[in-house]
Amino acid sequence: MTTPGTDERLREAFDALASGVRADPEAYRRVSAGWRRRYRRRRLVLAILAAVVFAAADAVGLWALSQADPNTHVIFSDPVHQPVGPEQVDRIGQP
């Protein structure tokens, strides 16, 4: 363990070390400006990355849609029934 003499010597050494340190009045302002600058840069990079991902997804989607065959019916894949004559009309609901 430590003796009381050791504690006193450590306290005196730290006091001597602390008395030699001079505080810079502009240090906080300078460091705070650096933090704000990095924060703004981080947000800008994130916004650009989100825009690039969004644009890439749109481009891939448009490319996939442009590669589709226009004659292929995906939603209405049932064959279209044409009425044979004017007396045969397919109706749904009331006339």
Image (cartoon, rainbow, N blue to C red):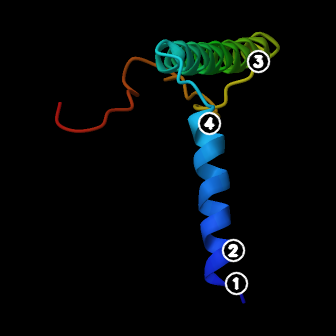
Name the one closer to the observer, 16 or 46: 16
Q: Pick the quarter of the image with the N terminus.
A: bottom right
Specify the amino acid type for callout 4: Asp
Q: Earlier in the sequence, mark 2 or mark 4?
A: 2
Indicate the position of residue 25 as horizontal and vertical percent values.
46, 15
Q: Quadrant of residue 61?
A: top right
Q: Mark 3 points at which residue?
A: 60
Q: Residues within 10 Å of mark 4 (few under 14, many from 20)?
A: few
Furthest toward the left, the residue is 94
Q: How far apart are marks 1 and 3 (CA)?
A: 70 Å
Q: Mark 2 and mark 4 in contact? Answer it, CB < 8 Å.
A: no
Q: Which amino acid does label 1 sit on?
A: Thr
Quadrant location of residue 18? top right
Percent of width and height locating residue 17: 66, 42
What's the residue at 70%, 84% (across, down)? 2
Q: Which residue position holds label 2?
A: 6
Q: Do the residues labelled 3 and 4 touch (CB within 8 Å)?
A: no
Q: Distance between the residues labelled 4 and 1?
A: 92 Å
Can you tell which mark lies on residue 17? none
Disc 3 versus disc 4: nearer the observer? 3
Q: How crowded is mark 2: few (under 14 residues within 10 Å), some or many (20 or more)?
A: few
Residue 70: x and y in percent read 73, 12
Nearer-N-terminus badge (3/4): 3
89 with respect to 44 (left or right): left
Residue pointed to by mark 4:
78
- Verify CB contact (< 8 Å) between mark 2 and mark 1: yes
Q: Name the element at disc 2.
A: helix
**Amino acid identity at mark 3:** Val
Give the left or right position of residue 61, taking residue 28 as reference.
Answer: right
